[in-house]
Each structure stands twice: as structure tokens, then as C-alpha cells.
Image (cartoon, helix red, strand yellow):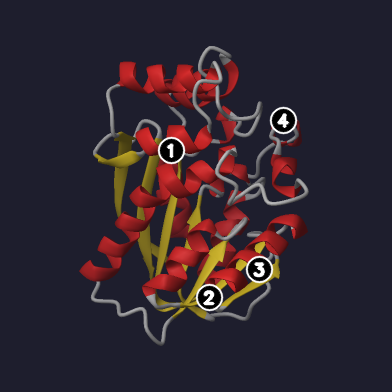
Amino acid sequence: MEKIAKEIYDQINNEVYKSQGDIWWTPDNILYLLKTSINPWRVGYAARVLEKLNIDAKNKKALEVGSGGGILAEEICKMGFSTTGIDPADESLETARNHARAEGLSIVYEKGTGEQIPYPDQSFDCVFCCDVLEHVRDLPKVISEISRVLKSGGVFIYDTLNRTFVSKLVAIKIWQEWKRWAFMPPNLHVWKMFIKPGEIKELLAKNNLEWQEHGGSQPNVSIPQMLGFLRKRAKGEWNFAELGKHFWLVESKDMNILYCGYAIKK
């Protein structure tokens, strides 16, 4: 897999993360669904990986690449890691710092990108990169940088969107474009930037990262029920907070849309 062509990358709306004010922790906001609907799945997966590998987070250092407003970084910190988050958006970093301070959590947030991680080689025991890989232009460089800052024997935990017919129908058409159900801003994701499992496995192998497994996800309810919930939100009967109380992801073998995985640095 190569660097994304400029004409494709220009279609994605990464500017949403630079919006003023708290767009992450306000319940009636799309990004709050990361906490209510996505985090239970990805945090649960990460916890099981760490337990399987007998990794005690205490006295270990973790980095989140693309930490946004801190929704995942705070969970990483609560696992016991000495936690650092990097993000290119100053507005999101300010939100993350303020929220961590209010929660009494000691998390270091600094400006940085996946293509240029601002830390020395072998700085971290664990690197997390979730809901980010499908947003970057130079994915090979990001994977290379993650491997560089990860210690030998360290763990890379990630999730991303698969490039399939199903993901185009669900993640693009239903979630973003078709107004009857859409709940995401237009162009929050671009289908051509989605990553097939085989593509990420190839990049991991090229960067001294030994792939271990992939897992999938699915809604906690049936597809008709999910569409009914999304319709309620689109009609104004529910806000995002209400949607998050009814709709979330659970672990599955289905990797057609959102999938997770981990690799170990050789």
C-alpha cells in the first residue's frame, strides 16, 4: 500500500477535529459516540490482549497516536499505563488536557502526527492507534514511525475500517450520506482510504511488527433495529446521547466494516 493520492486525501474532512470548543465530551455531539458506542468494544479488546500477553500496565509507557479529545487515552491511563497522547489539532489537545485535569488523570498531551512522532526510538511499551489509520495520507510512514518508537517486544494495538462493499454501504452511505439515517458529517471518512486487513498485515511485516490476529465488530442490535435508532436521531426524536444508550459495537468475527488487531515488535 502506498501514500494516498492528493485528490483522494483532499476529499476527507479532518478539519472537524479543529472545531472550537469541546466537541468530544459533550453528550449531544457525534464524537461522544466514541465513548458510548465504540470504546466498550475497543477497550475491551485491548484489555483482553494485554491480559493474554500477561502485560501489567503499571510501570509501562503507552502512546496513543491521534488522541483527539482524550476519550481513549483516559481509558488507557485507567489501565495503569503512564500515558501520552499526540494529535495535530490544537483544539482537541486543549479539550483533552482540560478533561484529564478535571478527572485528576496524569496524561501528557503533545502536538504531533503519525507521520512524525516526536519521540526517540523505543520510547513506549505499547502504542495505540484507533480510528486514525483511515484518516492519514501516508500510512506506510505512520506504521514505520509507530514501529520506531515501540520497544522490542512492545505491542501495537489498532482498529480501522475495512474497504469492502459492505463498509461502503454502511459506513459511507447509511452513516454519512443518506439523510434518512445519516449521523456523521459528510466526508468524515472516505471509502478509498479504508484499509484491507491484508494491506495492514503487509505494512506491519515490512516494519518489523509481527502481526498476531484480527477481530471484527457488529452492532449490539439487528440491522433493522439499528436503522430504526438512526432514523429516530435523524428525525430529532433522539439526540446523540440517547442514541449511545441504545446502539454500540460488540466483538464479532465480522470484519466487513470496523476491525481491530495487534502486532508485536520483533
Q: Which mark is residue 105?
A: 2
x%, y% of residue 171? 49, 27
Residue under numbered circle 4: 11
Cα–Cα span, label 3 and label 1: 24 Å
Among the two numbered marks 4 and 2 on one chain, the one whose residue lies closer to the N terminus: 4
User: Dots 1 and 4: beta carbons under 8 Å?
Assistant: no
x%, y% of residue 47? 30, 64
Front in this rendered view, residue 213 or 203: 213
Residue under numbered circle 3: 97
Q: Which residue is drawn at 65% across and 71% down?
A: 109
Residue under numbered circle 1: 244
Cα–Cα span, label 1 and label 4: 28 Å
Among the two numbered marks 3 and 1 on one chain, the one whose residue lies closer to the N terminus: 3
State whether residue 71 is above or below residue 223.
Answer: below
In this rendering, would 47 be left or right of 85? left
Among the two numbered marks 2 and 3 on one chain, the one whose residue lies closer to the N terminus: 3
User: Dots 2 and 3: beta carbons under 8 Å?
Assistant: no
Cα–Cα span, label 2 and label 3: 9 Å
Cα–Cα span, label 1 and label 2: 24 Å
Among the two numbered marks 3 and 4 on one chain, the one whose residue lies closer to the N terminus: 4
The reply to whether residue 208 is visible in this rendering is no
State whether residue 232 is above or below residue 27.
Answer: above
Among the two numbered marks 1 and 2 on one chain, the one whose residue lies closer to the N terminus: 2
Front in this rendered view, residue 105 or 157: 105
Q: Which amino acid does label 2 sit on?
A: Leu
Front in this rendered view, residue 83 or 248: 248
State whether residue 86 is above or below residue 171.
Answer: below
